[in-house]
Image (spheres, helix red, strand yellow):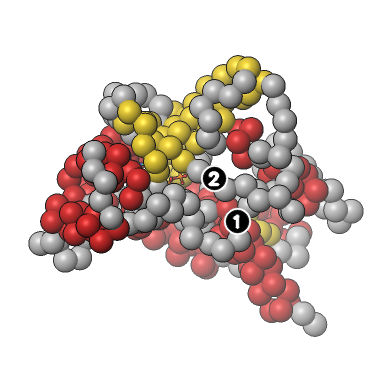
Amino acid sequence: MDQIAITQKIGHSQGRVFSLPINLLTINQFFGTTMSPDEARKFIQERADTSIEEPRNFEEQALKFIGPELYQAFFLGYTRKQWGKEPTEIPASILKRLPVRFNYDDNYFAHRHQGMPEHGYTSMVENILDHPNIEVKLNTELVASDIEDYDHVFWSGPLDAYFKHRLGRLQYRTLDFKRIEQTGDAQGCAVMNYTDEEVPWTRITEHKHFSPWEEHDKTLLFREYSRACEPGDIPYYPIHRTDGDTLLEQYQEAATAEKGVTFVGRLGTYRYMDMDVTIRSALDTLAEWQKAHAN
Ligand code: UDP
């Protein structure tokens, strides 16, 4: 991984384009101003709802930090499309994933080192699976006797699927992708978010911008449409709710009681994790397991 790509986002709202995540350029573009960082901070503080002390949900978190105008332009419609719920039904933690900055730094993450695998995640996973000790069996269901036959099982599938949904189905969002092939440069950035509710997709990714060191005349884009995950669909996002989730707690209890199995990943732990966190957590889980089983 000797090449670094920074994933820059642009937002498309009410027929205009804006810098995302929200930074000083977004604020000045949106309000038609030329404010300095200190002026912008004061300006936003005047709009923010200071009566909210402990935000109980996504909407309160947004109103407390950025006020109603930016919330409505950039978060309300997108969040309804992405989660199929009102922002009041979604935890504040989802918004805390996103930075809001009073300078011109438009980087999505604050990590010192950032990058993409040079040949993409597919080849990274292929290289992992290429290990002589790894055998891949596709379309194979886990059966109870497997758990006895193997030294240990690491389950990265959906938590409820491990238990054959015996208590009911946990909720996930799935994505439909529309593939668009064009020539040239179609949008000039890796990801464009469409924050208006009337636009049916949430974002468009133009993949060649993730690897600017490669040259391509053609370009490939994917439009993302989010919807409720039905049986048979691929689950992408666990849905967290502000009113608690008894079913999830029951499955978590069952998972803790299960011997010889470790639940890992976004689906196995029903957690909204980024790729870097997922990889870190996989390495840590394995190191812990090896330590506990060293003889
Ligand atoms: N979000 C939004 N507008 C945006 C980007 C994000 O309202 O332009 C909200 C939305 O609810 C989303 C959440 O913030 O689900 C987290 O965004 P992120 O970009 O981290 O989502 P991911 O890349 O994991 O789909």
Image spot of residue 294 (x, y percent): 77, 80
User: Which residue is label 2 attached to?
Assistant: 7
- Against 136, is 261 above or below? below
At label 2, which amino acid type do we have?
Thr
The answer to which of marks 2 and 1 sits earlier in the sequence is: 2
Left or right side of 69 for 286: right
Residue 229 seen in the current view:
no
Report the residue that reaches farthest toward the bottom.
295
At label 1, which amino acid type do we have?
Gln
Please tell me in which quadrant of the rendered image residue 207 appears: top right
Residue at point 69%, 72% (across, down): 287
Query: Do the residues bearing badges 2 and 1 touch, measured as CB atoms within 8 Å?
Result: yes
Residue at point 74%, 53% (across, down): 1
Residue at point 26%, 46% (across, down): 34
Dividing the image into four equal quarters, which quarter contains ligand 1?
Answer: top left
Between 34 and 20, the one lying in front of the other is 34
Left or right side of 258 for 197: left
- Against 291, is 171 above or below? above
> Which numbered marker is on residue 114?
1
